[in-house]
Structure formats: structure tokens, C-alpha cells
Amino acid sequence: MSGTPKCREAILEIKPYVPGKPIEEVQRELGIQDVIKMASNENPLGPSPDAVLALREAVERVHLYPDGNCYYLKEALAARYGVSAENIIIGNGTDEILKLLAEAYINPGDEIVVADPTFSEYEFAAQVMAGRAVKVPCQNFRHDLKAMAAAITPRTRLVFVCNPNNPTGTIVSQKEVASFLDKVPPEVIVVFDEAYSEYVTAEDYPDTLAYIKEGRPNVIVLHTFSKIYGLAGLRVGYGLAAPEIIRAVNRVREPFNVNLLAQVAALAALKDEFHVAKSQEVNARGKEFLYGAFSALGLKFVPTEANFIFVDVGRDSREIFQKLLRKGVIVRTGDIFGYPNYLRITIGTRRQNERLIQSLKEILAGD
Amino acid sequence: MSGTPKCREAILEIKPYVPGKPIEEVQRELGIQDVIKMASNENPLGPSPDAVLALREAVERVHLYPDGNCYYLKEALAARYGVSAENIIIGNGTDEILKLLAEAYINPGDEIVVADPTFSEYEFAAQVMAGRAVKVPCQNFRHDLKAMAAAITPRTRLVFVCNPNNPTGTIVSQKEVASFLDKVPPEVIVVFDEAYSEYVTAEDYPDTLAYIKEGRPNVIVLHTFSKIYGLAGLRVGYGLAAPEIIRAVNRVREPFNVNLLAQVAALAALKDEFHVAKSQEVNARGKEFLYGAFSALGLKFVPTEANFIFVDVGRDSREIFQKLLRKGVIVRTGDIFGYPNYLRITIGTRRQNERLIQSLKEILAGD
């Protein structure tokens, strides 16, 4: 097919990501001003006030390239976790680290193992590198780690454990993870995506950091500043792993992948333990409120360890989504995860939760 | 080699990028406080004041994900250039767009054609995708477009024209480009990297936008907010091309690649024509000042159309670089570009230029 540029065949299979609708887009398209977003699992309290202060001080320096090595942020994370800077990779959001992992490890035809449903960007990253995602159905909305271990083949390079899982909010336990890792061949990397770990209250949540500290060569743990730290807009996530993995991923990293303001804000947010504690408390209360309200409305939901709830609305959730949108409430439909009757709703502030429930009540009553 | 995770062989050949040393790093390592950076072609006047104001207003919203579609920035760019939003891709710096182009078009064993010396990230992007860079020597520090056209083979997917070229500051003309494009097969994409175009004063600089407007399917023009717009720290670049190319590149783009503050600042900076004009003027004057000073010091240099000058220091430039560093002046050595006797020096403010020249004079006098 000469005549025009031809893109790689592998990428033709990629389905575009469906993001949560931005507030501005809803305002623009529907002409509503008062819009709240409970769609993207952002922190409803906003960014850490310390991060905002740090940003205000740094905005006049944005003509300078960022430190490509993220020196100060890595030092702070290393101190926090008791690891070395060589155990750390910082990315333009965890999204970028997922792509870097694929670029570092996936040759055409290689496989990754993921849960179904789970965060879609694992598969995306593999597809960019002409890899293939083997999807293992969740059991009772939880990762089926036994089946995932059994799905590993000689072509498997990466296994993704989203813990808590997006969109279900469920976790796998310390014991399950230990038994799982015993079965994973040492040349296969297990990626623990712990984007929501700060919200977890379950006591049997795995201590994956211990695997990094003991020098396990085939584990990487991913964290983000986009969730409880309230910096989704700035794009900064990080990975903790053995230096060999970090070096491989650094080979394919662009030199200035993490912007200057992201580094400054993340450093400040990391130290703001008060904001994290407050955010945990607001989430814990909001969770109980929404559990109560969903129960009262007769809606089944998956108990969550994260800052969102997967709710069964008992009919095509896109319809409810559209009606909520017109009331200025943005949520996420489950169809993109293969659960067309579900909504994924971010736990908000009390006021946001009340507005959601009131709107949902009116809609379900046929308003 | 079972036992540990094995990264892709193709990436083992990647040489790490050598960035300009960050000011903070020099302060930390040498214990000097008063450090100036003339190493990374940043705008010495700083960011647009309008961009700084816009940033101050936006910092409290960084808990929200950015608009993955960069709606407002694309609309503004479309209006500026008289094209459609479908002609535009925004990246986490132009660096990211280079990688996206490689991901979209380069299969293992495919080739790109680049000048030598030129910006190293073209080759990097190709290497990530197991592609190979065919390097065509510059003639008199300028792209040899005839030789580059002749270097195209059936495996060539992308040809990179860095115009003005980094690190030489030279340009190719409208006429040369027109004749070059006549020879490029229609299935090969020509990438014009015009990161420094706003500094160009030559009248025969190519109007590459015209190719986009006429719908040419195999041209993409790259611009950045990192140089004259003074937003290097925020990471935002963009590409203009036929919708087919934009769609291909969008397939491999992460959904939230451009951070929220970058979008806000770029939009404001784009409208701040005064800052651009002032930056052009400071650069024009600084260029004349440095031309004069280098001549007086007996140093040959390559006349530049950009905001940096490639200077022959007549000996191993790493030595001069180290001595300048100890005087608190960061520049860039030419060895990484294959010119070990050259320095690449960013044109600064009058004060910075004077300090550079005074320091250089002392060093050359054997101080």
C-alpha cells in the first residue's frame, strides 16, 4: 500500500481510552455551571495545601528544564520507604511507567497477564509493543491469583496485580500474594499497582515493599500522586523495584519526563501527612454514607478498599450516567469494564455524596 | 537466560541522554550559589508573565486530571495557524511526540534518516522501537538534504529535519526543502522539528505550515513551548500534520499525557506576543554581542538562526566546560555531538553573556 504513510499494524487493535468527562467539557456541552466530578477517583479535598504553596513559589522557574533525574523527590521517597534512589523510577503519571515497562520488556507476540475487569492501561501498554493481554476473569470481583498464575506461559513477561483493583475496589491479601509469588517464574515481572493503597483499611493488605527491600528481582510496586495526594493534574507516579528493573526502564525513559512543578508539588505533598490523614477520614466517612444510601435505594455494590464504589444500578448504566450528567454529576459507566449495569462512583465530600444520592434517587424514581 | 527478567535486546544499544546540568545540581556538587545556565537553550527572560499569572490561578485545581484532549490549547493553536484541531497533537514536550511517532510507525528493523550532528532524541525514539538511525553528515554544519534524500531506502519510515538544527544553529531554506520533498516517497514521513523557529531571522526559512494546510499526508511540523515561550519546565510541545498522522499518533498516546498546568500556561504564553517579541530582541542583541566577543577571543563559531551558538574552543571542550562550571557557568560540551572541540552556548541576557565571556577569557588566558 504505497502512497501514504502506514502505521504499525499492531496499534490498529488499540481501543481508545475512555476518560472521565472533564468538568469544563460538561459545562461547555450542556451549558451547566455547577458540575461535580465523581468519575476519576480524584481527591475531593483538592491538592495538599503545602503542595499548592510550593507550586506558587515555583511558577516563576518554569522556563528551566526539570531535573531529569528527579533527585530531591527520589531522595525523599527513598527515605520514606527505606530504600535507595536506585530502587526508584518517577513517571509522567503511573501511566507512563506502564508504557516504559512494556517498552523495556515486551517483544512482539509476548504476553501479559491481567485481571478482568481491571485498569485498561496495562493492556494498552502491551498493545503498543505488539504484545497481547491474557485476561483472567475476576472471581467475586477479586483477582483470581491462582488462575492468573496458571495463565503464565513461556511468553509471559509481565503480570499486573491492581490492588486495590480498579474498578472493583477489592484487594488480594498478603497470604494470597505470597502464595502467588511462589508460583511465578523468576523471569516474569509482577507489577503491583497500588495507586489506591493509602485508602486501604484491611489488615491483611500485602506488604509488597518487603519484596523490594529483600531485593526480589521480579517485582515492581507502583504508586501515584494522582489519588490521595491530590495531584492528578500534574502527572506524577513512581515505581519501586530492584535496580536492574529501574535501569532497564530508565533506558526507554525520555530525559525530562516529569515536569518541574510535578516534582516540586509531589515533594511537598509527600510530607503533608495531615492532608493524607484528613483525606483518609473523609473517604472512610463517605464510604459509610454511600453504603447506607445505596442500601436504602436497594442498589447492590462491591465493598471497597479504595476511594470509589462499583455499584449495580440494575439497568444500562449509560442511561443513568446521562441523566446524572444533566444534573451536573459526572460518574463513570461500567460498560467500558464489561459491566454495563454498573457505575463506578468516586467517594466525594459529604456535600458531593448527598448531591449524588439525591440525583440518583430522583432518576431511579423516574424523575 | 532464565532466572531474572530480561529486557528487550534492542534497548541495550541506547546511549543515555546527556542533559544540561541542572543549576541545583551544580550548587549541590560544587557548593557554589551563584550559578547561571547557558546549557539547555531555555529563555533567559523566564516564562511569559501572563503564563505565570495563569499558573498562579490554576494551582488549586491540580487534583483534577488534565483534559486528555487539550481542547482549549488545540483550539487556540488551530486559530493561530489556520488549521483544524484534527491537525494537532500535543505532547509532554516534543520529546514525547518523537517517541509517539516511532511507536506509531517504526517496526523492528525500520530506518529513520537524520543529520549528523543533530538532536539525539530522534535516534533514541527509533531505538526504543528497534529501529535504526541512518546518519547523514552535515555539510558545513548544515543538513545535506540531497544526501538525506539519497539515504532513503524501502525501510525508511521517518526523516528528521531539525530546522534550525541543534547543535549547529543552521537552517535549510524554503527552496532546498521544496526540492527535498519532491524526492521523498509519499509513504515516508518528513518531520520538521522547528523548536527554535521563533528565533529565525533568515528570509528564506521554509513555510512548512503551507504543506500542512495543503493537506500533504507525509509531513509533520513540531513546535515547542520549551524555548522562546519559556515553559521548558512544564513539558509541552505540539505537532501539526494531516489528520491521518494525528490519528495514528493518538492511538499510542497515554490519555493524560499533558499536565493541567502545562495546558494552562501554554495557552497564556501563546497569546503573550509581547514576551515573544522581547525575547527575540534580547536574543538578537545577545547574538551580536557574543559574535563580537568570540571574534575578539579568536574563537571560530557557526553563525546561528537559533538561541545558541556552536563555538570552536580549539581544544577538548570538556576541560573548558569544567572550568566554566567552577565559575558557576553551565554550558554544553560538543563531544556528545561528535565535536569534542566545540561548546554549545545558549545566548543569555546581557549580564549572563558578559559573565560567560569574562569567565571564558580568564580560562583561555590560563587563569
Image: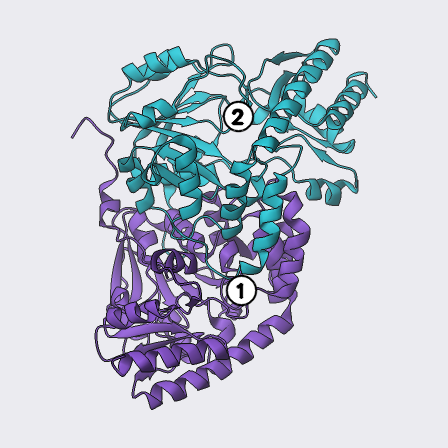
Chain colours: A purple, B cyan
Q: Which chain carries label 2?
A: B
**SS at circle 2:** helix
| Horizontal arrangement in the rendering, residue B167 relative to residue B206 (left or right) | right
Q: Which chain carries label 1?
A: A
Q: Is residue B98 visible?
A: no
Quadrant where the C terminus of chain B sits is top right
Q: Is residue B99 visible?
A: yes
Q: Tell me the amino acid under the disc marked 2.
A: Glu
Q: Which residue is drawn at 57% across and 19% down?
A: B339
Residue B306: % across, % down: 56, 22
Q: Which residue is drawn at 38% across and 73% down?
A: A345
Q: Is residue A124 above or below residue B111?
A: below
Residue A76: % across, % down: 64, 59
Between the C-alphas of marks 1 and 2, the distance is 36 Å
Q: Tell me the amino acid under the disc marked 1.
A: Gly
Q: In this view, does A139 lie above or below B71?
A: below
Identify the residue under disc 2.
B198
Q: Quick one: label 2, few (<14), some, or many (20+) residues within 10 Å?
A: some
Q: Do labels 1 and 2 share a chain?
A: no
Q: In which quarter of the image is residue B45?
A: top right
Residues B301 and A324: in front is A324
**SS at circle 1:** loop
| Horizontal arrangement in the rendering, residue A294 relative to residue A277 (left or right) | left
Residue A291: % across, % down: 39, 86
Identify the residue under disc 1.
A230
Q: Residue at x 81, y 20 (%)?
A: B362
